């Protein structure tokens, strides 16, 4: 019983810790703006969000990926084939799990430009320079995605690993993603799910509302 309560407490406080680190990274970004006299950035909220989230993800991303080693993620990604769209690749943590022999081209849809240097490094390390294209926009921006070659009806595989949890309208987004797929194409999703425990489910719902709102403000 004691261990169960301890595990519950840890699962409830984990997201709060994530939020706290996000706010801390925001503080570091603002301090850097002052130190470097980059005051023009203060009028550009999207740039500040970009920088803050990049700091957060570069610190937390490797641990998130390691936690997935015993999950279904490695096996799911090994099944990606053909023309692939990877949503929110971040710094490229998932690339080693892809079977490059099955893949013709990859479009990595990553709006956080500050993560692109780390993503390019991972692309190079995984020998994907010839097939990987970074698409610098959000997954909701269908027009911009088309400009980079992500055309409806042309994609074999879409990969979304814990990305839709931060999208304001996930159901609408999923419908748009299906439109990108060829007939018989596959949408690979690994995501948070609703807890079966009533108390945990309620706390989970409240935390999701908080995280989505904070995501729109500070770029979680």
Image: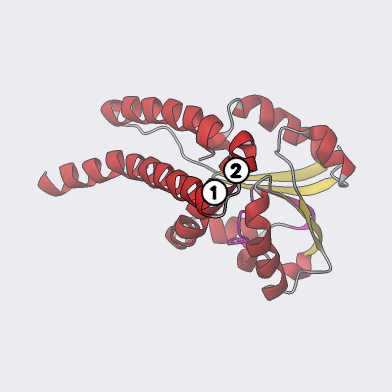
* Residue 80 image-quadrant placement: bottom right
Q: Residue 193, position in %: x, y? A: 45, 36
Residue placed at 71% from the left, 28% from the top?
Answer: 175
Q: Is residue 103 above or below residue 140?
A: below
| Quarter of the figure with the N terminus | top left
For the residue labelled by badge 1, is the local secondary structure a helix, a strand or a loop? helix
Quick one: 35 or 204, which is closer to the camera?
35
Residue at image point 47% right, 44% down? 26
Q: Residue at x 70, y 39 (%)?
A: 138
Above or below, comparing residue 66 to residue 47 in the picture:
below
User: Which residue ends up furthest to the front in the rendered image?
Assistant: 37
Is 139 situated left or right of 184 in this image? left
Quadrant of the rendered image containing residue 204: top left
**Callout 1–callout 2 Cβ contact below 8 Å:** yes
Question: Residue 130's spot in the image, x, y percent?
Answer: 84, 68
First to last magenta residue range:
81-94
| Residue at the outermost left position | 2
Residue 156's place in the image compared with 118, above or below, is above
Q: Which mark is residue 39?
A: 2
Q: How is the image coloured?
A: secondary structure
Picture disc at residue 202: none
Q: Quadrant of residue 216?
A: top right
Residue 33's disc number: 1
């Amino acid at each position: 019983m004691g261990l169960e309560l301890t595990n519950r407490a840890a699962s409830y406080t984990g997201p709060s810790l994530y939020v706290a680190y996000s706010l801390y990274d925001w503080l570091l970004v603002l301090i850097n703006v002052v130190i470097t006299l980059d005051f023009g950035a203060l009028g550009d909220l999207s740039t500040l969000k970009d920088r803050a989230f990049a700091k957060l993800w570069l610190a937390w991303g490797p641990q998130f990926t390691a936690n997935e080693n015993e999950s279904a993620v490695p096996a799911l990604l090994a099944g990606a084939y053909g023309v692939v769209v990877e949503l929110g690749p971040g710094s490229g943590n998932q690339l080693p799990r892809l079977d490059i022999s099955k893949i013709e081209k990859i479009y990595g849809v990553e709006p956080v430009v500050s993560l692109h240097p780390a993503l390019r490094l991972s692309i190079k390390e995984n020998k994907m320079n010839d097939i990987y294209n970074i698409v610098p926009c959000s997954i909701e921006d269908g027009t911009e995605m088309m400009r980079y070659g992500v055309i409806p009806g042309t994609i074999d595989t879409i990969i979304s690993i814990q990305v839709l949890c931060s999208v304001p309208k996930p159901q609408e987004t999923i419908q748009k993603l299906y439109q990108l797929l060829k007939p018989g194409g596959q949408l690979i999703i690994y995501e948070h799910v609703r807890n079966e425990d009533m108390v945990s489910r309620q706390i989970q719902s409240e935390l999701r509302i908080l995280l989505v709102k904070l995501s729109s403000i500070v770029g979680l």
